[in-house]
Amino acid sequence: LRKLIFTLLTFLLPALTMSGAGKSFTLVIDAGHGGHDSGAKGAVSAEKNLTLRYALAFGKAVEQSCPDVKVIYTRKTDVFLPLHERAEIANRNKADLFISIHINALEPGHISRGFQSYTLGTGEHTGNKGLKENLEVARRENSVIFMEKDYQSNYKGLANSAEGDKNRERSVELSRLMQQEVCKATGRRNGGSHQNNLAVLRLTSMPAALLELGFISTPDEEAFLNTDSALSLYTSGILNAFVRYKRKYGGAG
Protein backbone atom coordinates (compact mmCIF):
# COMPACT_ATOMS: atom_id res chain seq x y z
CA LEU A 1 0.00 0.00 0.00
CA ARG A 2 2.83 2.36 0.90
CA LYS A 3 4.55 1.64 -2.39
CA LEU A 4 1.29 2.31 -4.23
CA ILE A 5 0.77 5.64 -2.46
CA PHE A 6 4.39 6.63 -3.12
CA THR A 7 4.01 5.74 -6.80
CA LEU A 8 0.79 7.73 -7.10
CA LEU A 9 2.33 10.77 -5.43
CA THR A 10 5.34 10.54 -7.73
CA PHE A 11 3.06 10.89 -10.75
CA LEU A 12 0.47 13.24 -9.26
CA LEU A 13 2.69 15.91 -7.67
CA PRO A 14 4.31 17.07 -10.94
CA ALA A 15 0.88 17.15 -12.58
CA LEU A 16 -0.56 19.20 -9.71
CA THR A 17 2.40 21.57 -9.84
CA MET A 18 1.99 22.03 -13.60
CA SER A 19 -1.73 22.57 -13.15
CA GLY A 20 -1.17 25.24 -10.53
CA ALA A 21 1.34 26.99 -12.75
CA GLY A 22 -0.87 26.72 -15.81
CA LYS A 23 -1.90 30.37 -15.69
CA SER A 24 1.13 32.00 -14.12
CA PHE A 25 0.92 35.34 -15.93
CA THR A 26 -2.16 37.58 -16.06
CA LEU A 27 -2.58 40.05 -18.91
CA VAL A 28 -5.40 42.59 -18.95
CA ILE A 29 -6.26 43.99 -22.39
CA ASP A 30 -8.28 47.19 -22.48
CA ALA A 31 -10.18 48.25 -25.60
CA GLY A 32 -10.41 52.03 -25.26
CA HIS A 33 -13.74 53.87 -25.21
CA GLY A 34 -17.07 52.11 -25.92
CA GLY A 35 -20.82 52.65 -25.66
CA HIS A 36 -21.79 56.32 -25.77
CA ASP A 37 -18.09 57.20 -25.70
CA SER A 38 -17.13 56.69 -29.34
CA GLY A 39 -13.64 58.12 -28.96
CA ALA A 40 -12.11 59.74 -32.02
CA LYS A 41 -14.08 59.61 -35.26
CA GLY A 42 -12.76 59.21 -38.78
CA ALA A 43 -14.51 59.44 -42.13
CA VAL A 44 -15.80 55.86 -42.06
CA SER A 45 -15.09 54.49 -38.56
CA ALA A 46 -15.07 55.21 -34.83
CA GLU A 47 -12.20 54.60 -32.43
CA LYS A 48 -14.31 52.46 -30.07
CA ASN A 49 -14.96 49.86 -32.78
CA LEU A 50 -11.37 49.66 -33.98
CA THR A 51 -9.96 49.36 -30.47
CA LEU A 52 -12.32 46.47 -29.69
CA ARG A 53 -11.43 44.69 -32.92
CA TYR A 54 -7.69 44.96 -32.28
CA ALA A 55 -7.98 44.12 -28.56
CA LEU A 56 -9.91 40.91 -29.26
CA ALA A 57 -7.48 39.88 -32.02
CA PHE A 58 -4.45 40.45 -29.78
CA GLY A 59 -6.05 38.57 -26.91
CA LYS A 60 -6.88 35.61 -29.12
CA ALA A 61 -3.29 35.51 -30.40
CA VAL A 62 -1.95 35.46 -26.83
CA GLU A 63 -4.37 32.70 -25.83
CA GLN A 64 -3.20 30.59 -28.77
CA SER A 65 0.52 31.29 -28.45
CA CYS A 66 1.00 31.53 -24.67
CA PRO A 67 -1.04 28.85 -22.84
CA ASP A 68 0.37 29.89 -19.47
CA VAL A 69 -1.11 33.40 -19.81
CA LYS A 70 -4.52 34.25 -18.39
CA VAL A 71 -6.09 36.90 -20.63
CA ILE A 72 -8.70 39.24 -19.17
CA TYR A 73 -10.56 41.82 -21.27
CA THR A 74 -11.99 45.01 -19.77
CA ARG A 75 -14.72 44.78 -22.41
CA LYS A 76 -15.61 42.36 -25.19
CA THR A 77 -18.63 44.24 -26.50
CA ASP A 78 -19.64 47.84 -27.28
CA VAL A 79 -20.22 49.03 -23.70
CA PHE A 80 -19.17 52.12 -21.76
CA LEU A 81 -16.72 51.48 -18.94
CA PRO A 82 -15.36 54.28 -16.70
CA LEU A 83 -11.59 54.65 -16.69
CA HIS A 84 -11.29 53.84 -12.99
CA GLU A 85 -13.21 50.57 -13.50
CA ARG A 86 -10.81 49.53 -16.25
CA ALA A 87 -7.90 49.98 -13.84
CA GLU A 88 -9.82 48.27 -11.03
CA ILE A 89 -10.30 45.16 -13.19
CA ALA A 90 -6.52 44.91 -13.55
CA ASN A 91 -5.84 45.65 -9.89
CA ARG A 92 -8.51 43.23 -8.63
CA ASN A 93 -7.13 40.41 -10.75
CA LYS A 94 -3.56 41.16 -9.66
CA ALA A 95 -2.55 41.49 -13.30
CA ASP A 96 1.10 41.28 -14.28
CA LEU A 97 0.57 43.64 -17.21
CA PHE A 98 -2.05 46.10 -18.47
CA ILE A 99 -2.25 47.13 -22.14
CA SER A 100 -4.78 49.71 -23.30
CA ILE A 101 -5.44 50.03 -27.04
CA HIS A 102 -6.42 53.34 -28.66
CA ILE A 103 -6.46 55.14 -32.01
CA ASN A 104 -4.96 58.62 -32.31
CA ALA A 105 -6.50 61.76 -33.87
CA LEU A 106 -5.75 65.38 -34.65
CA GLU A 107 -7.92 68.42 -35.23
CA PRO A 108 -9.34 68.88 -38.77
CA GLY A 109 -6.74 70.22 -41.16
CA HIS A 110 -3.82 68.53 -39.41
CA ILE A 111 -2.13 65.39 -40.73
CA SER A 112 0.10 62.96 -38.86
CA ARG A 113 0.98 59.28 -39.14
CA GLY A 114 2.59 56.62 -37.03
CA PHE A 115 2.40 54.26 -34.10
CA GLN A 116 2.93 55.65 -30.58
CA SER A 117 2.93 54.22 -27.07
CA TYR A 118 2.45 55.97 -23.75
CA THR A 119 3.54 55.18 -20.19
CA LEU A 120 3.92 56.95 -16.88
CA GLY A 121 7.40 57.91 -15.75
CA THR A 122 10.20 60.42 -16.01
CA GLY A 123 12.26 61.32 -19.03
CA GLU A 124 12.62 63.74 -21.91
CA HIS A 125 8.88 63.64 -22.61
CA THR A 126 7.87 64.84 -19.14
CA GLY A 127 8.00 68.36 -17.75
CA ASN A 128 7.27 71.43 -19.90
CA LYS A 129 8.52 69.83 -23.13
CA GLY A 130 6.44 66.71 -22.67
CA LEU A 131 3.41 68.71 -21.61
CA LYS A 132 3.48 70.68 -24.87
CA GLU A 133 4.14 67.60 -27.03
CA ASN A 134 1.60 65.28 -25.43
CA LEU A 135 -1.07 67.67 -24.13
CA GLU A 136 -3.59 66.85 -26.86
CA VAL A 137 -3.38 63.10 -26.25
CA ALA A 138 -3.75 63.56 -22.50
CA ARG A 139 -6.69 65.93 -22.95
CA ARG A 140 -8.49 63.58 -25.34
CA GLU A 141 -7.88 60.31 -23.50
CA ASN A 142 -8.76 61.76 -20.10
CA SER A 143 -11.83 63.70 -21.30
CA VAL A 144 -14.01 60.60 -20.88
CA ILE A 145 -13.70 61.15 -17.11
CA PHE A 146 -16.29 63.91 -17.36
CA MET A 147 -18.83 61.45 -18.80
CA GLU A 148 -18.84 59.63 -15.46
CA LYS A 149 -21.27 60.55 -12.69
CA ASP A 150 -18.87 60.43 -9.74
CA TYR A 151 -15.73 61.59 -11.51
CA GLN A 152 -14.80 64.08 -8.77
CA SER A 153 -14.54 61.39 -6.10
CA ASN A 154 -13.21 58.66 -8.40
CA TYR A 155 -10.24 60.74 -9.57
CA LYS A 156 -9.58 62.85 -6.48
CA GLY A 157 -6.16 61.28 -6.00
CA LEU A 158 -5.18 61.15 -9.64
CA ALA A 159 -1.88 62.91 -9.03
CA ASN A 160 -0.66 60.08 -6.79
CA SER A 161 0.33 57.11 -8.92
CA ALA A 162 0.03 53.57 -7.60
CA GLU A 163 2.96 52.56 -9.81
CA GLY A 164 6.34 52.04 -8.19
CA ASP A 165 9.71 52.73 -9.77
CA LYS A 166 10.09 49.09 -10.85
CA ASN A 167 6.73 49.15 -12.59
CA ARG A 168 7.62 52.37 -14.35
CA GLU A 169 10.90 50.94 -15.61
CA ARG A 170 9.12 47.86 -16.92
CA SER A 171 6.41 49.98 -18.52
CA VAL A 172 9.03 51.99 -20.40
CA GLU A 173 10.72 48.75 -21.50
CA LEU A 174 7.38 47.42 -22.79
CA SER A 175 6.81 50.68 -24.68
CA ARG A 176 10.26 50.42 -26.25
CA LEU A 177 9.59 46.84 -27.36
CA MET A 178 6.20 47.83 -28.78
CA GLN A 179 7.77 50.59 -30.87
CA GLN A 180 10.33 48.17 -32.26
CA GLU A 181 8.08 45.21 -33.00
CA VAL A 182 4.90 46.95 -34.17
CA CYS A 183 6.73 49.30 -36.53
CA LYS A 184 8.79 46.41 -37.89
CA ALA A 185 5.68 44.27 -38.46
CA THR A 186 3.46 46.96 -39.95
CA GLY A 187 5.94 49.24 -41.69
CA ARG A 188 4.27 52.24 -40.06
CA ARG A 189 6.18 55.33 -38.97
CA ASN A 190 7.70 55.13 -35.48
CA GLY A 191 5.92 57.88 -33.57
CA GLY A 192 7.99 57.26 -30.47
CA SER A 193 7.55 56.23 -26.87
CA HIS A 194 6.03 58.97 -24.72
CA GLN A 195 5.14 59.58 -21.09
CA ASN A 196 2.11 61.40 -19.75
CA ASN A 197 -0.48 61.60 -16.98
CA LEU A 198 -3.15 59.34 -18.50
CA ALA A 199 -5.77 58.33 -15.95
CA VAL A 200 -6.21 54.72 -17.07
CA LEU A 201 -2.46 54.17 -16.54
CA ARG A 202 -2.17 56.30 -13.43
CA LEU A 203 -4.68 54.15 -11.53
CA THR A 204 -3.12 50.76 -12.26
CA SER A 205 -0.72 49.07 -9.85
CA MET A 206 1.31 47.05 -12.38
CA PRO A 207 3.40 47.78 -15.48
CA ALA A 208 1.14 49.35 -18.10
CA ALA A 209 1.17 50.95 -21.53
CA LEU A 210 -1.34 52.72 -23.75
CA LEU A 211 -0.95 52.08 -27.48
CA GLU A 212 -2.02 54.60 -30.13
CA LEU A 213 -2.13 52.43 -33.27
CA GLY A 214 -2.40 55.24 -35.80
CA PHE A 215 -4.34 58.39 -36.72
CA ILE A 216 -8.00 57.91 -37.56
CA SER A 217 -8.06 61.56 -38.66
CA THR A 218 -5.55 60.84 -41.44
CA PRO A 219 -7.45 59.25 -44.39
CA ASP A 220 -4.81 56.76 -45.51
CA GLU A 221 -4.10 55.62 -41.95
CA GLU A 222 -7.80 55.20 -41.21
CA ALA A 223 -8.20 53.16 -44.41
CA PHE A 224 -5.24 50.96 -43.47
CA LEU A 225 -6.47 50.40 -39.89
CA ASN A 226 -9.77 49.10 -41.27
CA THR A 227 -8.15 46.35 -43.37
CA ASP A 228 -7.74 42.69 -42.41
CA SER A 229 -4.06 42.84 -43.31
CA ALA A 230 -3.48 45.68 -40.82
CA LEU A 231 -5.27 43.69 -38.14
CA SER A 232 -2.98 40.73 -38.78
CA LEU A 233 0.21 42.82 -38.91
CA TYR A 234 -0.52 44.85 -35.78
CA THR A 235 -1.53 41.72 -33.88
CA SER A 236 1.73 40.05 -34.86
CA GLY A 237 3.81 43.05 -33.81
CA ILE A 238 2.05 43.56 -30.47
CA LEU A 239 2.27 39.84 -29.73
CA ASN A 240 6.01 39.76 -30.50
CA ALA A 241 6.62 42.69 -28.15
CA PHE A 242 4.53 41.05 -25.43
CA VAL A 243 6.41 37.74 -25.75
CA ARG A 244 9.78 39.52 -25.52
CA TYR A 245 8.59 41.40 -22.44
CA LYS A 246 7.23 38.26 -20.80
CA ARG A 247 10.43 36.31 -21.43
CA LYS A 248 12.37 39.01 -19.62
CA TYR A 249 10.00 39.68 -16.71
CA GLY A 250 7.46 36.86 -16.52
CA GLY A 251 9.19 33.63 -17.51
CA ALA A 252 9.71 32.09 -20.91
CA GLY A 253 6.60 31.67 -23.02
Image: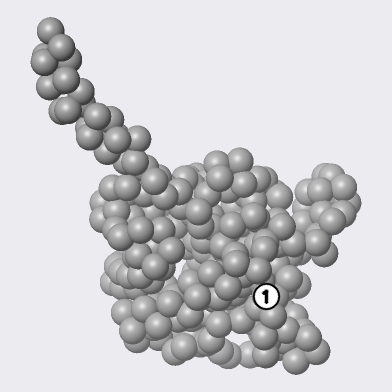
Using the rendered view, name the quadrant where residue 10 is placed.
top left
Residue sitting at x 70%, y 67%: 198
Q: Amino acid under label 1? A: Gly
**128 or 37, which lies in front?**
128
* Number of disc labels: 1
Find numbered disc 1 in the image and state the secondary structure of the residue it sits on. loop
Residue sitting at x 33%, y 84%: 184
Question: Is residue 180 shown to the viewer in this render?
Answer: yes
The residue most toward the front is 2
Relative to 177, is 83 above or below? above
Q: Is residue 127 left or right of residue 189?
A: right
Relative to 17, is 29 above or below? below
Q: Quadrant of the C terminus?
A: bottom left
Residue on which the image places disc 1: 121
Q: Is residue 248 left or right of residue 106?
A: left
Q: Is residue 153 left or right of residue 3?
A: right
Residue 238 on image: x %, y %: 39, 69
Residue 1 on image: x %, y %: 12, 7
Residue 122 on image: x %, y %: 69, 80
Residue 190 on image: x %, y %: 47, 88
Q: Is residue 248 left or right of residue 86?
A: left
Question: Is residue 224 shown to the viewer in this render?
Answer: no
Structural crowding at the residue carrying mark 1, measured as other residues with C-alpha within 10 Å and reported as few (<14), some (14–19) or many (≥20): many
Residue sitting at x 58%, y 73%: 169
Colour scheme of the picture? one colour
**167 or 26, which lies in front?**
167
Relative to 70, is 122 above or below? below
Using the rendered view, name the quadrant where residue 240 is placed.
bottom left
**42 or 209, which lies in front?**
209
Residue sitting at x 52%, y 61%: 99
Relative to 49, is 214 above or below? below
